[in-house]
């Protein structure tokens, strides 16, 4: 039993379809319970008031936004090295999910920032690098859509993902540097922005458990979505192949 | 039932509505495209295999 | 290799103004900035380094679609791919030719346009140095983008979408050098980072560009 067995598209579809209903249900349960617990049964945080409830959406989305790109990088590498079509298609299927997660993180961040920092948007390093990540997702998806031949598209997008990862990382550090250069000494922003990710240290247990539940739920939802969408991509590819065969036969 | 959100009610609610709407949209679009592609594949499979 | 470089340079110089277009674009953009934000000298002085960098970057971007597309259309790219010269060198030379015909003129023109934007006296040196270090990276990264989209019919807009995020680190550090230089601050850290990005891009990206080009040619 090895993971490579699932590189067979048929095997992939039959086995994922067996686990998908459970995954959908589990993710809906975790997100539902986590959000309801967080929304209705946790109090307000002393400094931030009720806005702390946004954390249950903001943090899981932000975590997935980054990790989706990492997953795409891994599956792109697997495609380039071992030429398993399922792997390339999984990267394609994951990209829009990652983009929506980035969007959610940006949107909830802006809504949260409005009362807390007094502005919807600030060119804080963290915010800026998420916007840049969004641009990378856009380019990646656009390249997939633009190329006709499926294998060429898989190869080219994999290379874009590889090179893009390096430059995305560089941008992260560049942006960090650039903002410190602009706002010498304005550390209130940075300290407050950190609250978003340093939850384990800053947020007490009341907020921590529902947050963990939401994170688990988001991860499960991500897995379910990617498996489901990969199945769709496999079928779409088969349609293409069948139609090509039909044209040859005719 | 509804917790007291104080002066941040708009903020919190709009964040929840926006995120859940985006998530629902993502799931909906994925499932709709999945259904369509699956049906189309069945149709074409039948046609090709029938002729072949 | 020399023959290929000379051929590319000659083509760029002769083929109906591809050479001057980038420069003209740079000039027009620089003229439009005071027209759009107002002529106050202090305002212009503070944004001049960033505007010069952005103008140079966009001028580079605009000339990219000619980089490989012409050779792709008339088939000479296929010939080059089967030639004894490795494709990595071909790509590097293409990028070098692009830099000589686009990047270098932009570097030389930047101080002149800096006068128009009321660039502080101390800034001229750093604008030229940062552009001199940064434009090679822009050419090499652009070549990668051009190689990705070479097979597409209307790839110009898509290529901009792909290349611009990749340009961001270079832009940030390059503009930072120019900005800090203009107001007389320490420039060492961004300058070193800029040089590092350029050196790494020149050393590594031709391999990626050549690999991508091979995929497109098969």
Image (tube, grey):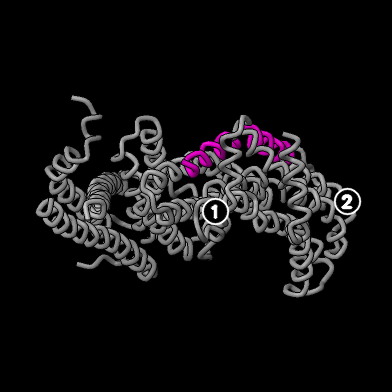
Q: Nearer the viewer, residue C43 or A238?
A: A238
Subunit that carries the residue with mark 2: C
Residue at the image position 86 percent from the left and 52 percent from the top: C124
**In the image, is residue A87 above or below residue A38?**
above
Residue corresponding to mark 1? A128
Q: Is residue C16 left or right of residue C142?
A: right
Element marked by disc 1: helix
Whole-percent x, y for residue C65 in the image: 61, 55
Whole-percent x, y for residue C181 in the image: 81, 48
Main SS type for the magenta part? helix
Residue at the image position 52 percent from the left and 47 percent from the top: C148
Whole-percent x, y for residue B32 in the image: 22, 62
Determine the image quadrant of residue C202. Answer: top right
Crowding at label 1, few (<14), some or many (≥20) Cα neighbours within 10 Å?
some
Residue at the image position 20 percent from the left and 39 percent from the top: A12
Q: Nearer the viewer, residue C5 or B21?
A: C5
Determine the image quadrant of residue A57. Answer: bottom left
Asked if one can make out residue A229 in the rendered structure from this viewpoint, the answer is no
Whole-percent x, y for residue C40 in the image: 82, 72
The range drawn in magenta is C191-218
Crowding at label 2, few (<14), some or many (≥20) Cα neighbours within 10 Å?
some
Label 1 to label 2, Cα distance in Å?
A: 30 Å
Q: Residue furthest top?
A: A1
Residue corresponding to mark 2? C122
Q: Residue furthest right?
A: C121
């Amino acid at each position: 039993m090895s993971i490579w067995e699932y590189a067979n598209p048929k095997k992939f579809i039959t086995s994922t379809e067996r686990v998908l209903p459970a995954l959908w249900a589990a993710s809906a349960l975790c997100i539902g319970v986590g959000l309801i617990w967080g929304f209705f049964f946790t109090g307000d945080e002393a400094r931030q008031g009720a806005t702390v409830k946004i954390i249950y959406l903001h943090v899981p989305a932000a975590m997935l936004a980054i990790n989706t790109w990492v997953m795409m990088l891994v599956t792109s590498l697997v495609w380039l090295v071992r030429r398993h079509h399922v792997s390339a298609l999984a990267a394609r299927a994951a990209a829009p999910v990652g983009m929506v997660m980035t969007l959610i993180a940006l949107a909830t961040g802006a809504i949260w920032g409005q009362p807390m920092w007094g502005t919807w948007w600030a060119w804080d390093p963290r915010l800026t690098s998420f916007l840049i990540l969004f641009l990378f997702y856009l380019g990646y998806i656009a390249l997939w859509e633009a190329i006709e031949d499926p294998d060429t598209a898989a190869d080219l997008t994999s290379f874009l993902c590889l090179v893009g990862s390096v430059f995305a990382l560089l941008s992260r550090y560049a942006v960090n540097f650039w903002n410190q250069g602009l706002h010498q000494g304005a550390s209130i922003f940075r300290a407050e922005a950190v609250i978003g990710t340093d939850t384990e240290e800053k947020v007490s247990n009341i907020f921590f458990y529902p947050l963990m539940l939401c994170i688990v739920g988001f991860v499960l939802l991500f897995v379910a979505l990617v498996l489901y969408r990969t199945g769709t991509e496999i079928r779409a590819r088969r349609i293409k192949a069948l139609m090509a065969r039909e044209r040859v036969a005719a | 039932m509804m917790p007291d959100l104080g002066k941040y009610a708009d903020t919190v609610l709009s964040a929840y509505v926006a995120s859940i709407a985006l998530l629902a949209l993502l799931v909906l679009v994925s499932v709709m495209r999945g259904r369509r592609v699956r049906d189309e594949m069945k149709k074409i499979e039948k046609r090709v295999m029938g002729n072949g | 290799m020399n023959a290929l470089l000379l051929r590319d340079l000659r083509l760029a110089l002769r083929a109906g103004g591809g050479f001057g277009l980038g420069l003209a674009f740079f000039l027009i953009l620089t003229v439009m900035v005071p027209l759009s934000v107002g002529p106050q000298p202090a305002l212009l002085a503070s944004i001049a380094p960033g505007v010069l960098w952005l103008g140079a970057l966009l001028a580079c971007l605009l000339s990219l679609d000619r980089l490989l597309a012409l050779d792709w259309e008339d088939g000479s790219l296929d010939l080059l791919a089967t030639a004894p010269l490795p494709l990595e060198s071909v790509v590097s030379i293409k990028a070098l030719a692009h830099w000589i015909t686009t990047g270098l003129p932009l570097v030389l023109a930047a101080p002149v346009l800096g006068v128009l934007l009321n660039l502080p006296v101390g800034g001229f040196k750093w604008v030229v140095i940062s552009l001199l270090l940064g434009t090679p990276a822009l050419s090499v990264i652009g070549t990668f983008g051009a190689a990705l989209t070479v097979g597409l019919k209307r790839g110009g807009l898509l290529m901009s979408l792909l290349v611009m995020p990749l340009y961001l680190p270079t832009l940030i550090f390059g503009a930072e050098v120019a900005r800090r230089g203009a107001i007389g601050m320490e420039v060492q850290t961004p300058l070193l980072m800029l040089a590092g990005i350029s050196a790494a891009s020149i050393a590594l990206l031709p391999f990626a560009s050549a690999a991508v080009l091979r995929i497109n040619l098969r």
